[in-house]
């Protein structure tokens, strides 16, 4: 049943169709509400957030409030990591943010799972599912839920990028491979090509190749210019 959801979300043709498939999958997984957010980093500007959800109308403004997102421990986790977070009231109270949980719990957001996919070219995809009842006690069942959600997110982000992000926006930045971006990130930290190779588990000459390719794609004469341009374009942070 869940496998059909992976295929269906990839076949979505518009925003309403994408929303329907995301909501349908989350309910099959045992969660009442869902939020799927495509984030686009903007050079020298605030990032753009494009969200689809089935939040109660009375709570939607609060859910999409950027200032709340900057305080929310779940969103801050997803901003920095790709590892899913299983959150509950304790996630908020141990950070002194119990009032945030109290507000959302009144709308059924008591516990859930949230994860983020961080992709090249400054694109990110955040998928969170929530419910009012406690999570299962069986660790195997929780593991299955998280694995299903991760696999669904991979399919959903592809559809979200195609449907929600204009083609002109997708093509305005050079397309660097994950290895090229990683090499630039390590270079930004002051590592030599040999040290970059050690950090990535690759040969020094391979690291040099990745850095050279990144320089070529960014039309830069040296690796330092490439790092600065990648930062300006939002390719690395």
Image (tube, rainbow, N blue to C red):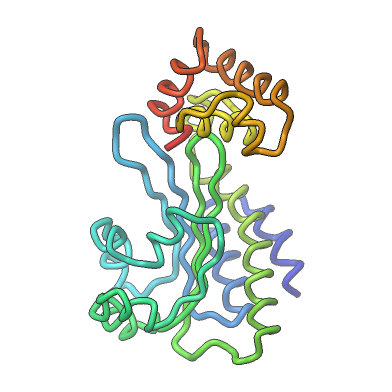
Please state if 81 lies on the left or on the right of 10 as rendered. Answer: left
Name the residue nearer the viewer: 67 or 82.
82
Q: Quadrant of the N terminus?
A: bottom right
Q: Establish if 228 lies above or below 87.
A: above
Residue at 40% x, 83% y is 110
The answer to whether 10 is drawn above or below residue 236 in the figure is below
Q: Quadrant of the C terminus?
A: top left
x then y, percent, for residue 143: 67, 77
In the image: residue 52, left or right of residue 207:
left
How many marks can you see? Answer: 0
Image spot of residue 19 (x, y percent): 52, 62
211 over 179 or under it: above or below: above
Q: Quadrant of residue 162?
A: top right
Residue 179 lies in quadrant: top right
The structure residue drawn at horizontal position 26% and vertical position 75%, both measured from the top left corner, is 97
**Residue 203 percent coordinates (x, y):** 73, 28
- The residue at the point 46 percent across, 28 percent down is 190
Write the residue at 61% across / 59% down. 153
Where is residue 54? Give x, y as percent.
44, 70
């Amino acid at each position: 049943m869940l496998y059909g959801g992976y295929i269906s979300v990839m076949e979505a043709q518009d925003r309403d169709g994408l929303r329907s498939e995301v909501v349908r999958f989350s309910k099959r997984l045992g969660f009442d509400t869902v939020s799927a957010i495509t984030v686009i980093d903007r050079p020298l500007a605030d990032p753009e957030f494009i969200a689809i959800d089935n939040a109660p109308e009375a709570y939607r403004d609060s859910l999409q409030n950027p200032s709340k997102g900057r305080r929310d421990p779940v969103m801050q986790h997803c901003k920095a990591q790709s590892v899913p977070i299983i959150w509950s009231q304790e996630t908020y109270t141990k950070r002194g943010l119990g009032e945030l949980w109290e507000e959302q719990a009144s709308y059924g957001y008591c516990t859930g799972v949230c994860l983020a996919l961080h992709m090249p070219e400054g694109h990110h995809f955040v998928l969170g599912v929530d419910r009012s009842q406690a999570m299962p006690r069986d660790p195997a069942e929780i593991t299955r839920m998280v694995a299903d959600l991760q696999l669904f997110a991979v399919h959903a982000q592809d559809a979200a990028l195609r449907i929600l992000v204009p083609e002109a926006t997708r093509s305005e930045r050079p397309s660097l491979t994950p290895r090229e971006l990683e090499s630039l990130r390590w270079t930004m930290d002051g590592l030599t090509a040999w040290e970059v190779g050690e950090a990535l588990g690759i040969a020094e000459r391979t690291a040099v190749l990745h850095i050279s390719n990144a320089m070529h794609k960014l039309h830069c004469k040296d690796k330092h210019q490439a790092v600065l341009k990648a930062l300006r374009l939002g390719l690395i942070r």
